Image (spheres, rainbow, N blue to C red):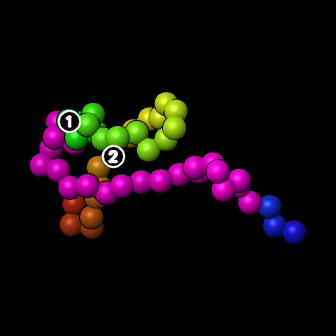
């Protein structure tokens, strides 16, 4: 028997956005609607591609 998380619980989720800089990202997140019925957190992380790492 396999047990899974309750479907009413959000385990994780993410959005990918493209911004010119971190200030623009922060400004947008401040306007973003809260997807949860109660308090939640937003985390901004950079996305790297192979060209960025060479």
Q: Is residue 27 above or below residue 1?
A: above
Q: Earlier in the sequence, mark 1 or mark 2?
A: 1
**Left or right for 23, reference 32:** left
- Quadrant location of the N terminus? bottom right
Q: Which mark is residue 46?
A: none
Q: Is residue 11 above or below residue 32?
A: below
Outermost residue, front side: 37
Q: Horizontal and vertical percent for residue 45?
A: 33, 46
Distance between the Cα atoms at labels 1 and 2?
14 Å
Q: Is residue 45 visible?
A: yes
**Left or right for 11, reference 35:** right
Q: Nearer the viewer, residue 14 or 36?
A: 36
Name the image quarter holding residue 5: bottom right
User: Counting other residues with Cα less than 10 Å from the Cα at mark 2, is it few (<14), some (14-19), or many (20 or more)?
Assistant: few
Provide the residue span drawn in magenta: 4-25
User: Counting other residues with Cα less than 10 Å from the Cα at mark 1, is it few (<14), some (14-19), or many (20 or more)?
Assistant: few
Residue shown at 53%/51% (left/top)? 12
Q: Horizontal and vertical percent for residue 17?
A: 26, 55
Q: Nearer the viewer, residue 53 or 41?
A: 41
Q: Which mark is residue 27?
A: 1
According to the picture, the residue beneath numbered tag 2 turns out to be 45
Residue shown at 51%/38% (left/top)? 37
Outermost residue, right side: 1
Name the image quarter holding residue 34: top left
| Helix, strand or loop for the magenta stretch, by majority | loop
In the rendered image, residue 19 lying in the magenta stretch gets the answer yes
Outermost residue, top side: 39
* Helix, strand or loop under label 1: helix
Q: Is residue 19 above or below residue 50?
A: above
Residue shown at 58%/49% (left/top)? 10
Q: Is residue 33 above or below residue 12?
A: above
């Amino acid at each position: 028997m396999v047990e899974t998380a309750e479907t009413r619980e959000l385990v994780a989720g993410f959005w990918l956005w493209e911004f010119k800089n971190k200030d623009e990202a922060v400004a947008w997140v401040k306007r973003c609607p809260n997807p949860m019925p109660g308090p939640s957190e937003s985390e901004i992380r950079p996305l790297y591609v192979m060209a960025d790492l060479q």
